[in-house]
Amino acid sequence: MEKLTASFSLVGKIATDDYVGFTFFVGCMAMMAASAFFFLSMNSYDRKWRTSILVSGLITFIAAVHYWYMRDYWAANAESPTFFRYVDWILTVPLMCVEFFLILKVAGAKKALMWKLIILSVIMLVFGYFGEAVDRDNAWLWGLLSGAAYFVIVYEIWLGSAKKLAESAGGAVLSAHKMLCWFVLVGWAIYPVGYMAGTPGWYEGIFGGISMDVIYNIGDAINKIGFGLVVYNLAVTATAKAEA
Ligand SMILES: *C/C=C(C)/C=C/C=C(C)/C=C/C1=C(C)CCCC1(C)C
């Protein structure tokens, strides 16, 4: 019956104080615009950066498609689109790990580093999904396990082999690597806050008032578009230097 009423109007109503719905809409447009920007600028740069910018565009494009669905899902059900959220993350977060590998390739990064980061990110997300969707009563435990994988990623890029490669590359690659490291340390830390706001646990009182989806949506916009812009900036700087 609900479906029937909804189908009478083409566009459902959105309350003016529906901040979740608002951030899904704006997020969707921002991801689309960013994708157009990355795809169209791709061929202006030195060959070796093209794949990196292509991946930046793929990250925001995959997110744009999922935001399209999440926006609809929220409008129809007023419920967190947990499934679409995690499908999006399981595709885009490993691609962000690929970005680290791609920019460090000039310093001789091996595929093993890429796979290590990808596997850690998948572990982080699968544990998070268990806490949010499968075993909510033990959300704190899944969150903790997920957080452990997150810390290993942070260690690997800030202090581990990825850092050594970035240092041996130096120049624009090193500063781009550092920026991406900051995104992972500070930008990605937004997600555990969203998780704590949206799952039951001892921490409920701390973040309980804020909407999990608003926090996740802000995190996605900052991280996905921000990551892409760092890579874009690297391509611009390095190409300009090569032509000078
Ligand atoms: C574009 C999407 C991105 C960058 C998503 C990143 C997601 C995370 C870093 C999620 C991390 C989580 C924890 C560290 C603990 C609680 C569970 C998660 C999955 C929310």
Image (cartoon, grey):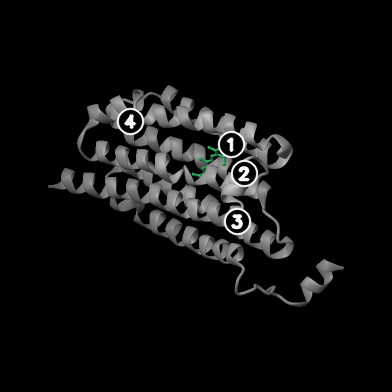
Dot placed on the residue nearer the N-terminal end, 3 or 2: 2
Q: Which residue is mark 1?
A: 125
Mark 3 Cα-neighbour bin, 10 Å: few <14, some 14–19, many ≥20: few
Q: Nearer the viewer, mark 4 or mark 1?
A: 1
Marks 4/1: CA distance? 26 Å
The percent coordinates of residue 62 (x first, y second) are 54, 50
Q: Which residue is mark 2?
A: 86
Dot placed on the residue nearer the N-terminal end, 4 or 1: 4
Marks 3/1: CA distance? 24 Å
Horizontally, residue 239 falls left or right of residue 96, namely left
Q: Where is 161 relative to 66, above or below?
A: above
Dot placed on the residue nearer the N-terminal end, 2 or 4: 2
Dot placed on the residue nearer the N-terminal end, 3 or 1: 1
Mark 1 Cα-neighbour bin, 10 Å: few <14, some 14–19, many ≥20: many
The secondary element bearing badge 4 is classed as helix
Q: Amino acid at mark 3?
A: Gly
Q: Which mark is residue 209?
A: 3
Residue at 39% x, 54% y is: 38
Quarter of the view holding residue 172: top left
Dot placed on the residue nearer the N-terminal end, 2 or 1: 2
Mark 2 Cα-neighbour bin, 10 Å: few <14, some 14–19, many ≥20: some
Q: Which mark is residue 138?
A: none
Residue at 33% x, 30% y is: 105
Q: Nearer the viewer, mark 2 or mark 4?
A: 2
Marks 2/1: CA distance? 7 Å
* Mark 1 CB lies closer than 8 A to ligand 1: yes
Q: Which residue is mark 4?
A: 105
The secondary element bearing badge 3 is classed as loop
Q: Amino acid at mark 4?
A: Lys
Marks 2/4: CA distance? 29 Å
